[in-house]
């Protein structure tokens, strides 16, 4: 039997659902970080809002710089997830950009925006 070279449409739909769920959560987290940055700029009454309550235990105690760094990392994560959706559309999702082989589904479920297999990642070229 020939080695599988791409994921089936059904498998791609499973990955799309995983990515969409992570994307929605990532966007919510990003929006909360942005709101936190805005709250650090001034002392308005928004700090009693439900969004602020979520941040109260963590991000609001961070410095503005740390919060901005977190927001930038979150935005990069969102962009990586969006790029993964494009690869699903192109039916190139899950193919290692170094080896050209399929990245195992278990890895993609854990890191749905992965573009490298573990072997390629550990080879240290990146």
Image: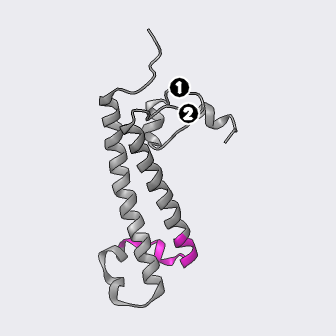
Q: Which residue is mark 2?
A: 117
Instruction: Report the disc number at residue 101.
Output: 1
Residue 73 percent coordinates (x, y)? 52, 61
Mark earlier in primary sequence (1, 2)? 1
Q: Is 11 placed left or right of 63 in the picture?
A: left
Q: Mark 1 and mark 2 in contact? Answer it, CB < 8 Å.
A: yes
State whether the magenta stretch is mostly helix, strand or loop.
helix
Question: In the figure, 45 relative to 9: above or below?
Answer: below
Quadrant of res 30: bottom left
**36, 79: nearer the viewer:** 79
Mark 2, other Cα within 10 Å: few <14 / some 14–19 / many ≥20: many
Mark 1, other Cα within 10 Å: few <14 / some 14–19 / many ≥20: some
- Residue found at the far top of this picture: 1
Range drawn in magenta: 54-68
Q: Residue at x 53, y 25 (%)?
A: 101
Q: Is 121 placed left or right of 111 in the picture?
A: right
Instruction: Report the disc number at residue 112.
Output: none
Q: Is residue 92 magenta?
A: no
The quarter of the image holding the C terminus is: top right
Question: In the figure, 7 relative to 26: above or below?
Answer: above
Q: Residue at x 33, y 48 (%)?
A: 20
The quarter of the image holding the N terminus is: top left
Question: In the figure, 41 relative to 71: above or below?
Answer: below
**CA–CA distance between discs 1 and 2?**
8 Å
Residue 24 percent coordinates (x, y)? 33, 56
- Residue found at the far front of this picture: 90
């Amino acid at each position: 039997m020939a080695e599988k070279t791409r994921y089936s449409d059904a498998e791609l739909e499973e990955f799309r659902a995983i990515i969409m769920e992570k994307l929605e959560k990532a966007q919510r987290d990003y929006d909360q970080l942005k709101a936190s940055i805005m709250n650090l700029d001034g002392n308005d009454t928004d700090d009693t809002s439900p969004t602020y309550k979520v941040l109260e235990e963590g991000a609001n105690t961070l410095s503005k710089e740390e919060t901005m760094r977190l927001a930038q990392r979150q935005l990069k994560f969102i962009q990586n997830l969006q790029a993964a959706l494009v690869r699903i559309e192109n039916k190139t999702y899950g193919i290692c950009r170094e080896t050209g082989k399929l990245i195992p589904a278990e890895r993609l479920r854990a890191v749905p925006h992965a573009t490298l297999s573990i072997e390629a990642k550990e080879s240290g070229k990146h």
